[in-house]
Amino acid sequence: MVRQLQQHVRVHAMEVVIACWEIEQSLQSLRGTGATMSDDDDDQVDRRQ
């Protein structure tokens, strides 16, 4: 039972990762840049310092 639950959680976690990646790709195409969201976060951190 525990193994089935773990597998179920793994499958859904992977689906979430893929969905986030697809959202990020869509945002990049809308912005017309190759920058990722994590790149933007790094820029914000640099400006605060």
Image: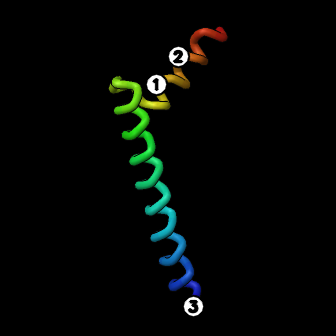
Residue at label 3?
A: 1
Instruction: Please give the name of the residue rendered at 45% of the width and 70% of the height, measured from the top-left corner.
Output: 11
Mark 1–mark 2 Cα distance, whole angstroms, equals 6 Å
Label 3, secondary structure: give it. loop
Establish if 12 lies above or below 20: below
Query: Of all residues shown, which one is farthest toward the front?
Result: 30
* Mark 2 Cα-neighbour bin, 10 Å: few <14, some 14–19, many ≥20: few
Establish if 41 lies above or below 12: above
Q: In which quarter of the image is the N terminus?
A: bottom right
Q: Tell me the amino acid under the disc marked 1.
A: Asp
Instruction: Please give the name of the residue rendered at 39% of the width and 40% of the height, measured from the top-left corner.
Output: 26
Residue 39, horizontal then vertical, whole percent:
46, 25
Residue 10, horizontal then vertical, whole percent:
48, 69
Q: Which of marks 3 and 1 is nearer the N terminus?
A: 3
Residue at label 1?
A: 39
Q: Which mark is residue 43?
A: 2
Foreground label between 3 and 1: 1
Instruction: Please give the name of the residue rendered at 53% of the width and 76% of the height, measured from the top-left corner.
Output: 6
* Tag 3–tag 1 contact (CB < 8 Å): no
* Tag 2–tag 3 contact (CB < 8 Å): no
* Tag 1–tag 2 contact (CB < 8 Å): yes
Q: Tell me the amino acid under the disc marked 3.
A: Met
